[in-house]
Amino acid sequence: MSSVFYILITLAIIGWAIYIRWYNSSTQKGKRGESFINNVLQHLPDEYFVLNNIMLDTGKGTTQIDHVVVSKYGIFAIETKNYRGDIYGDDNRKQWTQLIVTDVTYRRKWYKTYTYVTKNHFYNPIKQSLAHCYAIKNLLKEWPHLKVVPIVVFAGDAVLKNVITNHHVVYDFELLDTINKYRTIYLPDKEVEKVADAILNKDASGYIDNNAHVYNIHLKKFERNSKIASGICPKCGGTLVERQGKYGSFRGCSNYPKCRFTT
């Protein structure tokens, strides 16, 4: 009887550990953040249409947009991040930085506190949101003057420590005010639902699953890195040449200044 009890306890501990790991995975954190922001967006007036998890075919792959808000005041492409720690980044940097500082106190003969710093990098969310805006504009060519606004919202406990940007990078409690400050009318009321339907009709999330979307992302990354390794500019197809800059040597596109790609 006791051996069965210990086996059940062991299985319970293993199951709990698996659950905790799943719960704290980046995918689940992202979903919780998106769900929270969706709840925030439900407080917009009825004249706003909130679309969630929109996946658009760009012709070169797919792009997934966390939230799209359609209104007569424009369209808002919202990229949600559910992070903690200090966030550093700017418009041009390819990778942003997340610093998590943890103080741990150990008790031996006396108390001693150690500070641990974890540094992570993630793709520039401004670039993500701008790409989403481009995909939306490309889809809505029937409305060429419609304003599309990129917004990056942090839904977790992150602190925007040093974020330098010309775009909207906001905390979750600032999101509604950010959207509501746009009051210039670009669409008549009767056109708003038509625009929302146009986006929904092109939403590929129903037949392209998330695994396929992730595969497309990795494929594009592989193709990009392969071109760089072969000395080809992935942006315009020019030749990558060695250059000298203020901080040392780097490789840049031979078509500079028309193409400003560097690596």
Image: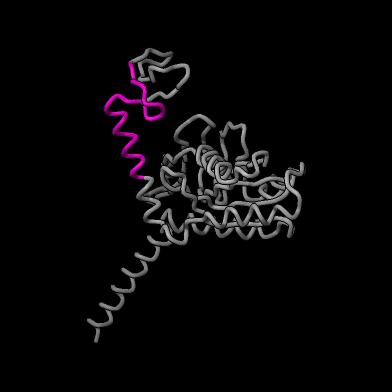
Q: Is residue 257 left or right of residue 174?
A: left
Q: Residue furthest left?
A: 3
Taking 64 as reference, is 125 above or below it? above
On whether residue 220 falls in the magenta region, the answer is yes
The magenta segment is 218-241
Tell me: residue 244, above or below residue 56: above
Front in this rendered view, residue 197 or 33:
197
Q: In this view, which residue lies farthest toward the front? A: 142
Task: Give the residue at x 45% y 46%.
Answer: 102
Q: Could you say which quadrant of the image residue 143 lies in?
A: top right
Please give left or right for residue 197 compared with residue 207 in the image: right
Point 59% across, 32% down: residue? 165
| Left or right: residue 107 compared with residue 180 | left
Which residue is at the front of the view, 104 or 141? 141
The image shows residue 238 at horizontal and vertical percentages of 36, 22
Residue at left offset 41%, top offset 29%: 235
Q: Nearer the viewer, residue 251 or 17?
A: 251
- Residue 110 drawn at (x, y percent): 41, 48
Locate the N terminus by quadrant. bottom left
Q: Quadrant of residue 39?
A: bottom right
Q: Quadrant location of residue 123? A: top left
